Image: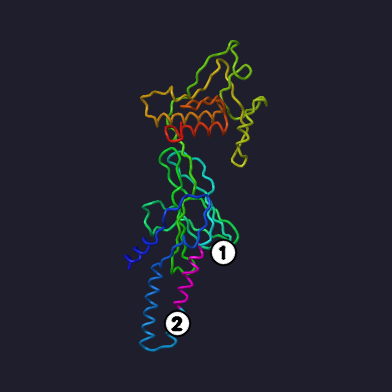
Amino acid sequence: MPALRAALRDALRWQHHSPSAATVLTMRRVYVLPTRAGIAYGLLLVLMLVGAINYTLGLGFALTFFAGACAIADMVLTVKNLAGLRLAAGRAAPVFAGEEAQFELTLHNDASTDRPAVRIGFHPPGTPRRTEAPNAVDVPAGADAAVVLTAPTQRRGWLPAPPVRLTTRFPLGLFGAWSNWQPDLRVLVYPFPEPQAPPLPMRGAADAEGHGAVGLDNFAGIRSYQPGDPMRHLAWRQIARLQPLDGGQLVTKHFDGGAVAELMLDFAELSVFVDVELRLARMTRWVLEAEARALPYAFRLGRHDFPAALGDAHRAACLQALALHGQEGGP
C-alpha cells in the first residue's frame, strides 16, 4: 500500500510552473490523496460492506454508504480548502551571509468561506514528500493572511526563494491536499563582515590653514551627550534613528583638531594576495564601522565609484556592490 501511494503521488506530482508574483490555485493545481487515517477508514468501510452483505443487514448498508458519503464530502472540502486561494509575494529584506533570509508571502481568500488549517512552507527539491509544512495559518473569508518563511543563506549574491508547498487536511484528516508554488521573489545577501578587520584606512593631511572639514576641528565620530556640549554639535540624524522605547539618548558629534582625515574604501588598494571573499568581507566591515561612527566615506569597487557620504542609501549601494562583485549583473 505505501508503494501504491508513492506511485500515485509521483503520477500527480506538480510540474514546474513559471515564477509569478501572484498566482491563483485553480482546481487543476491542487492534488489530493488519502492519508494513513483515510486508508484505514477505507478498509473499515470495506469490512462494514462485507459484513452487511454476509448478514443482509439493511442498517449495515445504510451506515456503510453514509460513512462513504462522508469520506467523499471530506475529500471535496479538503480540495476546496486550497482551491481558489490567491498567493502573492511580498518583500525580502537584505541579510548578511550566514543569517536567515526572511521571505514575506500573502494568502488572499476571495471566497465567502474561511480557509482554516492551511500549512505553508518551503519545499526545495529533495525534501521528503511526507515532510509537513511548518507554518499553519487560517485565512478568513474575504481577508488576507501574511506569513514569513525563512531560509538559510550560505554565500553572497541574489538568493531566489525556494519552491513553496501548501497543504491541508481539513476538515476530517482523511485526505491530504497539496499544491506547489514558485514565488517570484529573491533576497540580496551581503558578504558577512570580517570579525577582526584592520582599522579604517584613514588618510590625508591638513589643508593650507590647518583647519578641519567642520570649523576649526576635524569630525571624528559621535559619542553620548555630555552636559556643556554645544547644541549645534548634536547629531540629529543619529538621534532620529534611536527610538526612545529602545533606550535612545542624545548623541553629539565629536571633533579632533589637526589634519583632515579622508576615509576612502578602495578595493583595489587591498593586497591581491588576500582571498577575494576576505577582501569583500573586510570592505563590508569597514562600511558598517564607518556608518556606526558617522564618518563620511568614499567607496570604490570596480565600476562603482561613490563619493564620500553617509546614510542608508549610501550604505545600501556600497553593500550591494560588494554582494554582487564578480557575479552576473555585478561590478
Which residue is labeled 1 in the image?
Answer: 114
Q: Amino acid at mark 1?
A: Asp
- Please tell me which of labels 2 and 1 falls first in the chain: 2
Q: Quadrant of residue 293?
A: top right
Q: Residues within 10 Å of mark 2 (few under 14, many from 20)?
A: some
**73 or 136: nearer the eye?**
73
Q: Quadrant of residue 41?
A: bottom left
Instruction: Report x, y in % for residue 318.
Output: 51, 31
Residue beneath the point at 53% across and 14% down: 205
Residue beneath the point at 52% across and 57% down: 24
Disc 2, SS: helix
Q: Is residue 18 above or below residue 207?
A: below
Q: Residues within 10 Å of mark 1 (few under 14, many from 20)?
A: some
Q: Which residues are the magenta region? A: 67-82
Q: Is residue 188 above or below residue 181?
A: above
Magenta-colored stretch includes residue 80: yes
Instruction: Report x, y in % for residue 55.
Output: 37, 89
Residue beneath the point at 50% across and 27% down: 304
Which colour style is shown?
rainbow
Q: Classify the position of the N terminus by image quarter.
A: bottom left
Disc 1, SS: loop
**As drawn, is 177 to the left or to the right of 114?**
left
Dominant secondary structure of the residues highlighted in magenta in the image: helix
Q: Are marks 2 and 1 in contact (CB under 8 Å)?
A: no
Q: Amino acid at mark 2?
A: Leu
The residue sitting at the top extreme is 208
Instruction: Report x, y in % for residue 38.
Output: 41, 70
Which residue is labeled 2 in the image?
Answer: 63
